[in-house]
Image: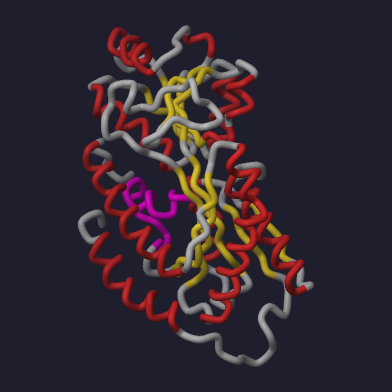
């Protein structure tokens, strides 16, 4: 599956770009003419969830039609995504998800759907840098200290992962440092964070949005930030690269997808609503350490192709075998 990812992306790219160029066509009954359901395969309160709610508000404001957010967490995003895959391809069931949609190709052996062939990308929505954090009781304050501790206690320091980025990011950290951590799987990063603050798991990789308040009040210890630059909201926190792991860059992004075969006028409308939501959210997103990621459909397709290549390289470097 890994070796065919880019080929599949490239086969689909001309078709998707052509779809972007198709003019909005008249159809029987204006779209939307009934409630739009935005399925979020993560728990409420995550960055992806809040962004989906902002898009729902824009849809209602623009059309008067109701748009609802339906949280369907579980199995690293697979439960909610499968819900959309089984729905009609009519634009009334939309998927708002994270980069797990692509990354699951490298973690899950038998996905019940094909993320690239069964879905059409609509728009990016936001990007979120991630933090490697630890429970205060672990007694460390930097990534170098984590590495030193893990080398002294191979297989004893645990990391929780409730998302694909969280899993791959910590696996890559192990590969680059030569340490061995104990992986503890979770259904969501919200559950991991709760257990980390409760002292049941030692470290994790999580997007900055979901953890900034806990860093500031001392309930968790931030060790390093992913990305090329320090966070404006945490300027004192070094990046992973500054901590000695040059080339490490595992962040998070969110976007909208629909079933393959969805009418192009519905795709174009949803893309516009995502753009309006990004404008409305800009200040709030940036104050939380992220950035808005409103794109054209063609831009999102090209981004996914590059992202797929990155995940493939990362998974190979970390020697991850889909399970």
Name the quarter where the C terminus is drawn. Answer: top left
The x, y position of residue 173, in whole percent, is 31, 28
- 13 relative position to 186: left or right: left
Look at the picture and state if 61 lies above or below 280: below
Q: Residue at x 66, y 81 (%)?
A: 31
Identify the image quadrant of residue 227: top left
Asked if the stretch drawn in magenta spans residue 106, the answer is yes
Q: Position of residue 145 (x, y in %)?
A: 37, 11
Q: Residue at horizontal 57%, vertical 70%?
A: 87
| Quarter of the picture holding the N terminus | bottom left
Q: Position of residue 79 (x, y in %)?
A: 53, 53
Query: How far across and down, in percent of the image, does residue 75 sit?
Result: 49, 46
**Where 94 sits versus 98, above or below?**
below
Q: Residue furthest right?
A: 64
Q: Which residues are magenta?
A: 98-115
- Horizontal arrangement in the rendering, residue 224 relative to residue 316 (left or right): right
Residue at image location 35% in from the left, 10% down from the top: 149
Look at the image and say whether residue 65 sits in the magenta stretch: no
């Amino acid at each position: 599956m890994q070796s065919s990812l880019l080929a599949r992306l490239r086969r689909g790219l001309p078709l998707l770009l052509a779809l972007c160029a198709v003019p909005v066509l008249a159809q029987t009954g204006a779209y939307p003419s009934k409630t739009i359901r935005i399925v979020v395969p993560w728990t409420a309160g995550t960055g992806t969830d809040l962004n989906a709610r902002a898009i729902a508000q824009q849809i209602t404001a623009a059309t008067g039609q109701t748009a609802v957010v339906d949280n369907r967490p579980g199995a690293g995003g697979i439960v909610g995504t499968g819900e959309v895959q089984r729905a009609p391809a009519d634009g009334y069931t939309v998927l708002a998800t994270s980069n797990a949609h692509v990354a699951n190709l490298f973690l899950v052996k038998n996905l019940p759907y094909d993320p690239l062939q069964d879905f059409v990308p609509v728009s990016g929505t936001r990007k979120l840098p991630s933090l490697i954090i630890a429970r205060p009781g672990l007694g460390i304050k930097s990534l170098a200290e984590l590495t030193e501790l893990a080398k002294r206690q191979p297989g004893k320091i645990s990391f929780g992962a409730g998302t694909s980025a969280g899993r791959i990011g910590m696996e890559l950290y192990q590969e680059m440092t030569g340490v061995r951590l104990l992986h503890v799987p979770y259904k969501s990063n919200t559950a991991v964070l709760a257990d980390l603050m409760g002292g049941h798991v030692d470290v994790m990789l999580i997007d900055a949005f979901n953890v900034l308040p806990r860093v500031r009040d001392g309930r968790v210890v931030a060790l390093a930030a992913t990305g090329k630059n320090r966070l404006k909201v945490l300027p004192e926190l070094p990046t992973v690269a500054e901590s000695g792991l040059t080339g490490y860059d595992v962040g998070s992004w969110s976007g909208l997808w629909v079933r393959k075969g969805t009418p192009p006028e519905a795709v174009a409308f949803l893309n516009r609503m995502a753009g309006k939501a990004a404008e409305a959210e800009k200040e709030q997103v940036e104050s939380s350490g992220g950035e808005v990621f409103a794109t054209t459909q063609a831009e999102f397709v090209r981004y996914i192709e590059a992202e797929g290549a990155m995940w493939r390289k990362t998974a190979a470097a970390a020697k991850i075998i889909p399970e």
